[in-house]
Amino acid sequence: MFGFLKDKLKKTIGALTRKAEEKEKIEERAVEKAEEVIEEKLEHKEPATEAKPEIRQENILEPVQEELRPELEEPVPVEPEIPTPPPSIEHEHKTLAPAKKEKVKKRVFSLTKKTLEDEELNKVLWDLQVGLLESDVAVETAEKICSKIREDLNGSEVKRGHVEELVEKSLRDAVADVLQQEEVDLIKEIKKAKRPYKLVFLGFNGAGKTTTIARLAYALEKSGLKCVLAAGDTWRAAAIQQLEKHGEALGVRVVKQDYGSDATAVIYDAVNYAETHALDVVLADTAGRAHTNKNLMDELHKIMRVIKPDKKILIVDSLTGNDAVEQARAFATSVGVDGVILTKMDVNEKGGAALSVAHTIGKPIYYMGIGQAYGDLERFDSQKILKALLD
């Protein structure tokens, strides 16, 4: 489960990490080269030529004065001025010390921290979006994940050596945001509600409604709730017999009528049977239908109007890819949906439906079908899905 999608997410983490590390190496080489040039210039700087002492005019005239005026007092000798030496290399080093320190600080910062930029993210996030679409993630869901990652990473500073950790955290947060949903324990909710609790199951042909109804009945019976099944699919050949077989295997009563009967009447009879026999839950099957089939959609509207179910549960085949999202939207718009059960998740390597369905219609996923046995109905746990994808 999720093998294909998990591989895509792992590749994204690796690609972003590699891009950041490659840029780090280029930056480090450039800084090192610049430092080498500066050091070389400082080491080979020649000292300035010593200034010649100034020859004062009075020193030249002094012997002449002595000859012409021997009677004068002996002149007081004048000491020559000592010229100021030019700045030494040591002095230059001391002068450069503060600037050098500041440069070293910046160098340490560049070696210990990394700023992720938009140009590094663009290609990798594009590849991620394509990978998500290939994994049957809906377009708007894929865009939301990529936008969240860009928002988290663009311009962010991260310690070198921790890029992969930051990228993985951002990806985890983005996927968690998409998977976030209202936590619903359906069995616990049924136990607190008025009896009989009425569940009507909807979905396209072949989604696995009848088998899912049997599995949920098994879980409810196991938790101490007594059930009755309503064979409301009066269109599909063998649908009634299939539900009867499940009823026999589970020891659960099935209320039925002939093929072509009014589905609303069948479900109504099942509700009456539950009330008469003090049963807890009615699970009503309906015919698989496309939202474009007007007659069958009218029948569904009638069922909702007469039965007034406590929950309308959409059964979605996870293998249908992006069609799963379109189906969910269609039923949510037409008759309303309270929650979803995803089927065939055990053989779904892509897993995009799990990310997309709840996000696009804003309704919780109650369960996932993960095998062939009655007990292979697992409560949807977003944290478990997240762990399966990224750990």
Image (cartoon, helix red, strand yellow):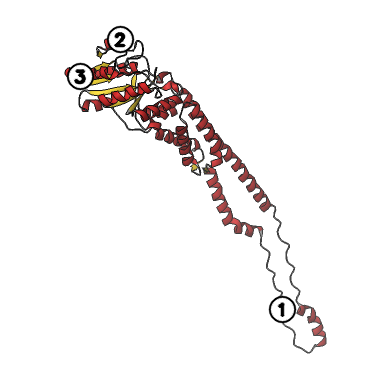
Percent x, y of residue 56? 75, 76
Q: Residue furthest bottom?
A: 71
SS at mark 3? helix
* Residue at 51% over, 40% down: 160
* Residue at 27% over, 12% down: 257
Residue under label 1: 78
Residue under label 3: 272
- Of the pair 302 and 239, the residue shown nearer to us: 302
SS at mark 2? helix
Residue under label 2: 245
Percent x, y of residue 1? 43, 21
Q: Amino acid at mark 1?
A: Val
Q: Amino acid at mark 3?
A: Asn
Percent x, y of residue 52? 75, 68
Q: CA distance from mark 1 to mark 3?
A: 133 Å
Residue 49 seen in the current view: yes
Q: Nearer the viewer, mark 2 or mark 1?
A: 2
Q: Nearer the viewer, mark 2 or mark 3?
A: 3
